[in-house]
Image (cartoon, coloured by chain):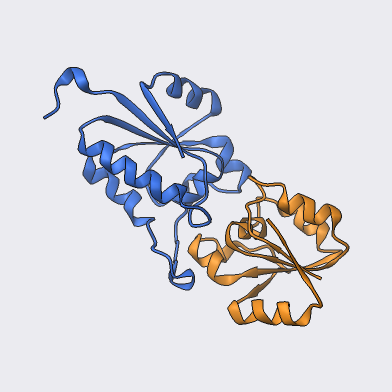
Amino acid sequence: MSEEGNVKKFMFVNRKAPYGTIYALESLEVVLITAAFDQDVSLAFLDDGVYQLKKGQQTKGIETKNFSPTYRALEGYDIEKLYVEKESLEARGLTEDDLLVDVTVLGRKEMGELMGQQDVVLSF
Amino acid sequence: MLHIINKSPFTSSSFDSCLRVADGGDVLLIEDGVYAAVGGAAEKQVREAMKQFKFHVLQADLEARGIADRVIEGINKVDYGGFVDLAAKNDNCQSWL
């Protein structure tokens, strides 16, 4: 049972594309574990990490589990703070409409400030 | 020669190095390398390199990443059979890891 004083601010920083490496999937696993302990969880998507949220992923052809629907399920675990860096989206020709879940788009400066406010930052 | 690239152009120098050093031939983008085939990402660089190389991209890896509908015009989409054909057609191949 959590006590008020034991809640820390956790941020998961996702900077890798999905499928090519295991980082994106492993990050999701740890995010869900952390949420089970009633912590204050934020997810940040930078660099190729923004590709994790791209709509329309179909993994049948590479015979790998499509874990992208999990991002839509995070809301059910009270994980609602998803942040995407604007510059990373733009560099990849993506817009907020290309993403499969509602996010807050932040500029690099705001993203940096948000990171500075965390108790724990885990990088994937 | 067939040049195979499996890393994102944003996270690795493989793509840049291949285009800088290789002397023409076929380039096949697979795994995270397929992000180079998408419009708005490395598009300018790819269009310039198209004068020298024939670009191919693996369809299954595009679909997995949700980007099969935004491949730069002129890049040839291949299935796994097409991958084998490219390997067989070329005298040799190089994986730019």
Q: Residue furthest left?
A: A1
Residue found at x 23% / y 42%: A77
- Which quadrant of the rendered structure holds the N terminus of chain A? top left
Residue found at x 68% / y 55%: B97
Q: Position of residue B67 (x, y in %)?
A: 55, 61
Q: Nearer the viewer, residue A46 or B88?
A: B88
For residue A55, what is the image quadrant? bottom left
Question: Is A42 located above or below residue A118 in the figure?
Answer: below
In the rendered structure, the answer to whether residue A5 lies left or right of residue B74 reads: left
Q: Nearer the viewer, residue B2 or A68?
A: B2
Q: How many marks?
A: 0
Residue found at x 81% / y 71%: B1
Q: Indicate the colour of chain B.
A: orange
In the rendered structure, the answer to whether residue A12 lies left or right of residue A74 reads: right
In the rendered structure, the answer to whether residue B51 lies left or right of residue A24 reads: right
Q: Position of residue B22 (x, y in %)?
A: 85, 60
For residue B24, what is the image quadrant? bottom right
Which chain is displayed in blue in the rendered image?
A
Q: Position of residue A16 (x, y in %)?
A: 52, 45
For residue A121, what is the image quadrant? top left
Residue found at x 61% / y 47%: A92
Q: Position of residue B6 (x, y in %)?
A: 63, 59
Question: Is B64 located above or below residue A88 in the figure?
Answer: below
